[in-house]
Amino acid sequence: MFDWISDAIDWIGDGISSLWDNTIGSAVDTITDAIWDVMFEWLFNLILVLSISLDTFYSNKNYATRKI
């Protein structure tokens, strides 16, 4: 008897959901993708610099011990 009320509520919920997905949701997805890209690039550069520093440290250490 009151199935039309639940249908109306579902219709309103679907409208709000599709509005969110087409406007704010897509903007939020774009922003979070950019944040993840920057974070992974930072992490990659950190690991790269650390590995180069470690390699340089051991190269200099070996050179110093051979020099003696």
Image (cartoon, grey):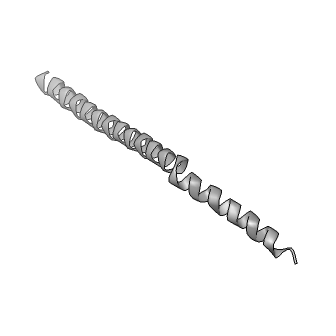
**x 52%, y 49%: residue:** 23
Q: State the count of labels.
A: 0
Residue 51's image quarter? top left
* x and y percentages locating residue 68 in the rendered image: 14, 21
Residue 10 or residue 52, whichever sits in front: 10
In-image side of 65 versus 34 (left or right): left
User: Is 48 above or below relative to 68?
Assistant: below
User: Is 1 above or below relative to 64?
Assistant: below
* x and y percentages locating residue 36 in the rendered image: 43, 44
**x 21%, y 30%: residue:** 56
* x and y percentages locating residue 25 in the rendered image: 53, 50
Residue 31 or residue 1, whichever sits in front: 1
**x 79%, y 69%: residue:** 6
Residue 18's image quarter? bottom right
In-image side of 11 versus 20 (left or right): right
Q: Residue furthest left?
A: 67
User: Is 32 above or below relative to 11?
Assistant: above
Quadrant where the N terminus is found in the figure? bottom right
**x 33%, y 41%: residue:** 44
Residue 54 or residue 29, whichever sits in front: 29
Q: Which residue lies furthest to the bottom in this view?
A: 1
In-image side of 16 versus 55 (left or right): right
Q: Which residue lies furthest to the right in this view?
A: 1
Residue 67's image quarter? top left
